[in-house]
């Protein structure tokens, strides 16, 4: 067993990324650098905006600040290595580095899954029980939901990582992706991956079904409540407050369901890479844009901060 561990830890992985398109390396580097810059500025900016505006100290924005933190961390775990591999010839990553990247990325993607579900429950309480909203969505419950999301994601990640470490790896292994994704790591193992594949399947199905069940149930009750409203203006206003969250949910879960549930979607490694780019790089950039572009309070805070900076600069 000790010899097996030594061989695995001495193994090296080569992240092939988009190396089959040599002419696109520079354009892709520029594109991903712009995306990452927008992601960092957008998510950290969203956290700052929520902190400085007392009007945004509500449960919805509490969850949104954590979603922005998760998106920032998720992108930072993946994108810098992607950028490095686009401009250097040595695309290697150590066994420990690859496992650590997988471990952290797994934590943040599972956390986001349940953070979006918590936000759906928050919208359900706000729309269906507005008079009890401040009591039902107490700071204690909000902290509990966020803590549960982080805790469960760590449990999932530790479980997947434990079973990955039981696999055997030798020498140099070529991973046909730009990120140390589970199936890509398992594909280069010398061991039987059956148990690993079953474990991640069970956890992934549970996570997806349970989170979507919370989201769909919450929005079913929201839809029923909204349709009972006598005023069309009231219906529009309520749907408008939920539109940003619904957009974020659709993009996130739509990408994951396409990648893992559509037949033959995993047959093409190029399709896997494109889908992986979308949910590891693009979605973390889109979320702060989605919530800021449709939110008057956020836009007003940004405008006030810009005006304050401009006045201070002129003075």
Image (spheres, rainbow, N blue to C red):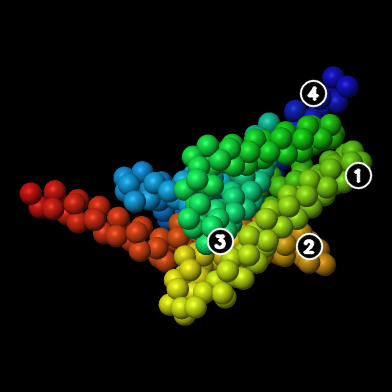
Report the mark closest to the observer, 1 or 4: 1
Q: Is residue 3 above or below residue 60?
A: above
- Distance Cα–Cα, label 3 vs label 1: 45 Å
Instruction: Please name which of the two marks, 3 or 4, marks the residue nearer to the observer.
Output: 3
Residue for point 17% across, 54% down: 310
**Disc 2 marks which residue?**
261
Answer whether labels 1 and 4 touch (C-beta < 8 Å).
Answer: no
The residue beneath circle 1 is 194
Give the residue displayed 68% in from the left and 61% down from the top. 217
State how many labels appear.
Answer: 4
- The residue closer to the viewer here, 128 or 78, is 128
**Mark on residue 128?**
3
Q: Reading the chain from its start, which is encountered first: label 2 or label 1?
A: 1
User: Viewer-nearest of labels 3 and 2?
Assistant: 3
Sequence-first disc among 2 and 4 = 4
Mark 3 vs mark 4, CA separation in Å: 57 Å
Residue under numbered circle 4: 6
Residue depicted at x 62% and y 45%? 111
Residue 298 visible in this rendered orientation of the protein: yes
């Amino acid at each position: 067993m000790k010899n097996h561990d030594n061989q695995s830890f001495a193994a090296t992985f080569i992240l092939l990324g988009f190396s089959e398109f040599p002419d696109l390396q520079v354009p892709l580097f520029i594109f991903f650098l712009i995306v990452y810059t927008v992601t960092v500025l957008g998510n950290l900016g969203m956290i700052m905006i929520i902190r400085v505006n007392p009007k945004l100290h509500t449960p919805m924005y509490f969850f949104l600040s954590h979603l922005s933190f998760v998106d920032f961390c998720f992108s930072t775990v993946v994108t810098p290595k992607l950028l490095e591999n686009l401009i250097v010839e040595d695309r290697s990553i150590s066994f420990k580095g690859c496992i650590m990247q997988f471990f952290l990325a797994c934590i943040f993607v599972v956390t986001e899954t349940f953070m979006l579900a918590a936000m759906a429950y928050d919208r359900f309480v706000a729309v269906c029980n507005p008079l009890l909203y401040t009591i039902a969505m107490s700071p204690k419950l909000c902290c509990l939901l966020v803590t549960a999301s982080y805790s469960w994601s760590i449990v999932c990640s530790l479980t997947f990582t434990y079973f990955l470490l039981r696999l055997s790896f030798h020498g140099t292994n070529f991973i046909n992706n730009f990120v140390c994704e589970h199936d890509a790591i398992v594909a280069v193992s010398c061991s039987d991956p059956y148990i690993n594949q079953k474990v991640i399947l069970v956890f992934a199905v549970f996570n997806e079904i349970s989170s979507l069940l919370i989201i769909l149930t919450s929005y079913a009750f929201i839809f029923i409540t909204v349709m009972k409203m006598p005023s069309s203006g009231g219906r529009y206003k309520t749907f408008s407050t939920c539109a940003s969250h619904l957009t974020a949910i659709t993009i996130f879960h739509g990408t994951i369901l396409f990648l893992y549930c559509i037949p033959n979607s995993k047959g093409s490694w190029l399709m896997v890479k494109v889908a992986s780019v979308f949910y590891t790089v693009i979605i973390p950039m889109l979320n702060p844009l989605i919530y800021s572009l449709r939110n008057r309070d956020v836009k007003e805070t940004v405008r006030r901060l810009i005006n304050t900076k401009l006045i201070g600069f002129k003075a």
